[in-house]
Image (cartoon, rainbow, N blue to C red):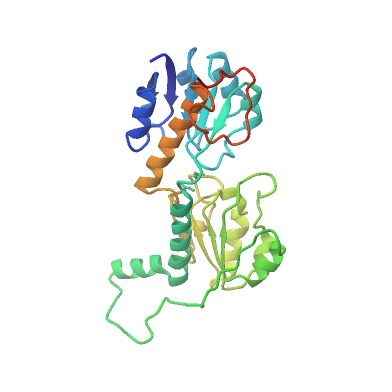
Amino acid sequence: GKYRVVSTKSMPGSRWIRLLTENDCRLEICTEPKTILSVEDILALIGNRCDGVIGQLTEDWGEVLFSALRRAGGTAFSNMAVGYNNVDVEAANRNGIAVGNTPGVLTETTAELAASLSLAAARRIVEADQFMRAGLYDGWLPHLSFLKANGEKPVTWKRAATMEDVLREADVISLHPVLDKTTYHLINPERLAIMKKEAILVNASRGPVIDEVALVEHLKANPMFRVGLDVFEDEPYMKPGLAEMKNAVVVPHIASASKWTREGMATLTALNVLGRIKGYPAWGNPNLVEPFLDENATPPP
Ligand code: GLV
Ligand code: GLV
């Protein structure tokens, strides 16, 4: 192939591989077993000739990598995620590199996980499962109950009511913002304090949207407050104390983890990179995270 494309991880499915290799790309998939690649690892992958990279949300894509990619002749980068807080888009665009993400295919899958977490937290499924496995179930009893059904009703915050109004009123709060300066520690001690004592808080966006240290304190002080977390401030770690809290259900960043969704995300990354390398918009609209206009781009045939 005439274009060299690097993927920093192996991804599910084969469609993304076929898309690239059947369209003039020589694909190199990194086999480094480390879960999280460092900037130095990725610099070595880019090398001195690279047209496009498919990267992961665990990687720090800033000036160092984008200028190296530019020097290697690259013009395309796609994150395999809808979120791109790990990407300095301005640095990319300064270096002539278009940035793609993978919206759409994970919306319902993520919503399902958020709903599952809120129900698991409400019905204390994890504690009940542990109770069974510990051999503590002696037979059905009228008072045997972990269960606290609240008749939860959804309230949606569309930035109309104040966030404080919604937090005061809601039984279940599911967080789905983009992580940026305006949403860092959106849930802070003051906001936790105004929430219902028996509210359920779910986060399947990015960990730093919640002040996790404050959350642990809040969970300790309010045993009926429950939380379902897919993401953490210092992934892959949890803040001290969180793992011991029975009123927390924690899962390892799996909101988009269905086969269909992950294969769809992988396919979108290939289309994003191809769309850029082969000449936007001849290849359809890549999912660029912001309009990226390249005056030197080859017009479509
Ligand atoms: C995963 O967290 C994503 O942003 O797609
Ligand atoms: C998406 O948000 C994921 O959890 O992978």
Task: Judge left or right: residue 247 versus residue 211.
Answer: left
Q: Which is nearer the eye, 137 or 80? A: 80
Q: Which is nearer the eye, 275 or 65? A: 275
Q: Quadrant of the N terminus?
A: top left
Residue at 57% over, 17% down: 70
Residue projecting furthest to the front: 301
Percent x, y of residue 106:
46, 48
Residue at 35% over, 38% down: 12
* Residue 189 lies in quadrant: bottom right
**Residue 29 appearing in the image:** no
Percent x, y of residue 140:
29, 82
Residue at 51% over, 53% down: 204
Is 112 placed above or below 73 here?
Answer: below
Task: Judge left or right: residue 143 versus residue 240.
Answer: left
Is 97 placed above or below 100 here?
Answer: above
**Residue 189 appearing in the image:** yes
* Residue 91 lies in quadrant: top right
Percent x, y of residue 40:
51, 23
Residue at 30% over, 70% down: 132
